[in-house]
């Protein structure tokens, strides 16, 4: 397929809507911008692939200088390892015999590390990985204020660190956190205290893995961290525009939709509903930003219909018109479709989202 210009004005009649379009020129700029920020501050970048779920995007990130990738699920990591990605961190407590068996197989294909925040998980890992010659690296997940998983104190980190360190087939890789947004100094203090305690007690702490896109431009504030994991930065989305972290022009992913009905003057209906845009609001009003008319609102969604409120807009789309929407949250939209269209200048390529839906 050959097209004449960038995403907004591309002749897209060949694409059946709704569809996800990704502008690879914007992707490349986003990758290079964060990589150069991390390089400048001496922080290793380990992008989270949950945003794109595409081996080709992971390869781009690594070619630009990323040290490896982050996955949340074993299935995502298996897909990436098959595509020859060599260094993978899974930031999730792995539980259950079948998953541990898959983890064992995966560790034979790539340099693998995982996290744990409790003794049950460490026990399962220790019983599965028993060979001292090929130890599995385990980082202690720390709750530095985001109130999700993670040990609750430096002392708990020390206890768990001892368990990991004393298991013959495990090696203690250090600390990992998904931090709260906002002030990062308390995250730094938390991790520094835990690191000091591990070292004072004769345990290693070579890596400290921090993360998040909302705080990516301040990743250097957590000076004790050795690496940063960002996911959303590769595409950006409306939530990041709203937070002032990027511009609309920096959003690489858009949903192409068709106006299917104009029941009234102030209402239009599009063919993208919650099964495409998802119901994530992330604290905003409306389910996405319409590039063609930013004052029009995606007011409500049913599964396959998006209801546009045009009462505050002069824009009056016709049935059959195509529109481009920047979703509130790009990562969840990637996971809704089997294929995305990669737009490279004039060329549009349909690509399978090979790690989509892999939730185990
Ligand atoms: C463990 C972990 N690391 C990194 C990230 C990437 O963060 P972001 O989505 O802010 O780019 C996430 C996001 O959920 C995460 O859960």
Image (cartoon, rainbow, N blue to C red):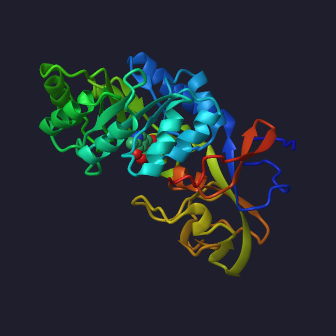
Quadrant in the picture for residue 116: top left
User: In the figure, is residue 129 to the left or right of 111?
Assistant: left
Quadrant in the picture for residue 15: bottom right
User: In the figure, is residue 5 to the left or right of 71?
Assistant: right
Coordinates of residue 72 in the picture (x, y in percent): 46, 45
As drawn, 27 above or below 149: above
Q: Is residue 351 in view?
A: yes
Q: Residue at x 27, y 47 (%)?
A: 120
As drawn, 63 above or below 112: above
Ligand 1 placement by image quarter: top left
As drawn, 273 above or below 229: below
Coordinates of residue 306 in the picture (x, y in percent): 61, 71
Q: Residue at x 53, y 40 (%)?
A: 77
User: In the figure, is residue 67 to the left or right of 2?
Assistant: left
Look at the image and tell me in which quarter the N terminus lies. top right
Task: Out of 184 and 170, give the one closest to the viewer.
Answer: 170
* Total marks in image: 0
Task: Out of 33 and 123, give the one closest to the viewer.
Answer: 123
Q: Residue at x 72, y 42 (%)?
A: 342
Q: Residue at x 22, y 32 (%)?
A: 161
Coordinates of residue 255 in the picture (x, y in percent): 65, 56
Q: Is residue 236 in view?
A: no
Task: Out of 314 and 355, give the one closest to the viewer.
Answer: 355
Pick out the residue farthest to the bottom: 263
Coordinates of residue 245 in the picture (x, y in percent): 44, 40
Quadrant in the picture for residue 293: bottom right
């Amino acid at each position: 397929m050959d097209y004449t210009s960038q995403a907004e004005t591309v002749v897209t009649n060949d694409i059946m809507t709704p569809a996800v379009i990704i502008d690879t020129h914007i992707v490349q700029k986003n990758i290079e911008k964060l990589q150069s920020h991390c390089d400048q501050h001496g922080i290793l970048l380990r992008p989270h692939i949950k945003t794109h779920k595409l081996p080709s995007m992971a390869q781009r990130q690594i070619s630009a200088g990323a040290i490896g990738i982050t996955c949340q699920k074993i299935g995502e990591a298996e897909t990436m390892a098959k595509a020859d990605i060599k260094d993978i961190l899974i930031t999730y407590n792995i539980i259950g015999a079948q998953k541990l068996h898959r983890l064992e197989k995966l560790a034979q294909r790539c340099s693998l590390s995982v996290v744990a925040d409790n003794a049950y998980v460490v026990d399962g890992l220790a019983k599965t990985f028993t060979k001292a010659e090929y130890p599995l690296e385990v980082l202690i997940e720390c709750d530095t204020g985001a109130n999700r998983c993670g040990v609750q104190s430096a002392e708990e980190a020390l206890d768990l660190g001892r368990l990991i360190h004393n298991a013959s087939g495990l090696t203690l890789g250090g600390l990992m956190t998904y931090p709260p947004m906002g002030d990062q100094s308390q995250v730094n203090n938390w991790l520094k205290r835990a690191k000091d305690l591990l070292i004072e007690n004769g345990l290693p702490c070579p890596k400290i893995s921090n993360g998040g896109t909302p705080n990516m431009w301040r990743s250097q504030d957590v000076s004790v961290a050795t690496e940063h994991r960002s996911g959303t930065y590769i595409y950006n989305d409306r939530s990041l525009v709203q937070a002032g972290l990027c511009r609309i022009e920096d959003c690489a992913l858009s949903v192409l939709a068709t106006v299917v009905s104009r029941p009234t003057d102030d209402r239009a209906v599009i063919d993208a509903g919650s099964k495409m845009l998802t119901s994530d609001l992330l604290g905003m009003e409306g389910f996405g930003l319409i590039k063609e008319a930013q004052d029009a609102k995606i007011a409500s969604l049913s599964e396959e219909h998006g209801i546009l409120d045009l009462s505050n807009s002069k824009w009056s789309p016709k049935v059959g018109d195509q529109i481009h929407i920047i979703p509130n949250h790009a990562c969840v939209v990637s996971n809704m479709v089997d294929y995305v269209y990669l737009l490279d200048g004039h060329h549009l390529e349909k690509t399978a989202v090979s790690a989509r839906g892999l939730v185990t």
